[in-house]
Image (cartoon, coloured by chain):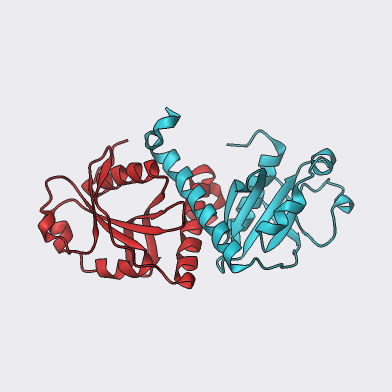
Chain colours: A cyan, B red
Amino acid sequence: MMPAQPGFRLARGVARMLIGMGHAPLCEFVPSGGLRVDVISVAPSGEIWIVECKSCRADFTGDRKWQGYLDWCDRFFWATDCDFPVELLPEGSGLIVADAYGAELSRMAPAAKLAAARRARVLRDIARTAACRLVRSTDPQAFPDMI
Amino acid sequence: MMPAQPGFRLARGVARMLIGMGHAPLCEFVPSGGLRVDVISVAPSGEIWIVECKSCRADFTGDRKWQGYLDWCDRFFWATDCDFPVELLPEGSGLIVADAYGAELSRMAPAAKLAAARRARVLRDIARTAACRLVRSTDPQAFPDMI
C-alpha cells in the first residue's frame, strides 16, 4: 500500500534500497527522548546508518534537531526526491535520492564511529523496538493495555 | 489466530509473558548456523534470554542441540505445558509453564553472562532479523527475490 505522506513514501524507497544492500532498516525510531529518526539501519557489519527523509524545502528548514541524530549513528544521510534543492543540505553528510519505489545512493556519508557502549545501546534499542513491533503485528493481545 | 503446532502455541504464551515483563521477544531466531531457538528475548537492561518450548517428552528427548544455545544467552529456560514431566529437565536451567494464552515463570534461570563481543553480535543479529521481518510484513516487494 502506498504511504500517504511524502516523507513516508521516501522512507519506503530508502528502505527498499537498504534491503538491497543487505542492511536491515527500521522506520520511525526513537534513539533518545525527544528525537525520532525516519530510518535507522543496521549493516551486516553492525554499522549503523540514519537517514532523514526531506520531501520539500520547508520540511528541511523546519528541522532543528538533525544535528542531534549524529550522536546515534556511524553515518548520516539525507534522502530527498529528485526535485529537492540539494544545495541547501549541509556538507559532510550523505545523500540518497529516493521515490516511493526505490532509491539511489548519490553521495556516501563519512564515517564517525560510535563508541562501543553507545553502539551496544543503539543495537539493543533497535532490537527491542523491532521485536516488540513484530509481536504487536502478529499478536496484538500480547499488549493488554492496547485493547 | 491460534498457532497450529503445540510448540508455537507455547511460544505465543511465553512471548505474552515476556512482553508483560518489559522484555522484547523474537521467535524462531538463528543465532548461528545449524541452531534455531524458539524464543530469544531482550530485557530492558540488555540481558538476553533464550526459551526452548517443549510440548511433550519426545520433543525434549529428541533435542540434541539445546546445550549449544547456552553460548548465546545470559539465561536459559525451558517452557512446557502443565502436564510435562519436568523431572526430565536438566537442573540449572529456568522453567516457564505456558499455554497458548500466557505463561508463568516457575523457576528463574541462573545468569551466565555473555562476553561483550558475543552480546554485541547477538543484539546486532536480533536487530537485523526483527527489522527485516517487519519490512517483509509491511512491504514484501522490498525483497525482489521473494516475488
Q: How far across and how far down the image is residue A33, in percent?
A: 63, 45
Return the residue nearer the eye: A63 or A10. Answer: A63
Question: Which residue corresponds to the image point at 84% horizontal and 53% vertical from the top-left?
Answer: A89
Query: From the viewer's perspective, is A136 left or right of A43?
Result: left
Quadrant occupied by the C terminus of chain A: top left
Question: Which residue corresponds to the image point at 39% horizontal and 43% vertical from the top-left?
Answer: B19
Question: Which residue corresponds to the image point at 79% horizontal and 43% vertical from the top-left?
Answer: A63
| Quadrant of the image occupied by residue A83 | top right
Return the residue nearer the eye: B123 or A22. Answer: B123
Return the residue nearer the eye: A1 or A115. Answer: A115
Q: How far across and how far down the image is residue B32, in percent?
A: 39, 69
Query: From the viewer's perspective, is A92 left or right of B75?
Result: right
Quadrant occupied by the N terminus of chain A: top right
Return the residue nearer the eye: B99 or A114. Answer: A114
**Residue A101 seen by the camera:** no
Q: How far across and how far down the image is residue B127, in percent?
A: 50, 57
| Quadrant of the image occupied by residue B51 | bottom left
Compared to B81, does B46 lie above or below? below
**Residue B17 seen by the camera:** yes
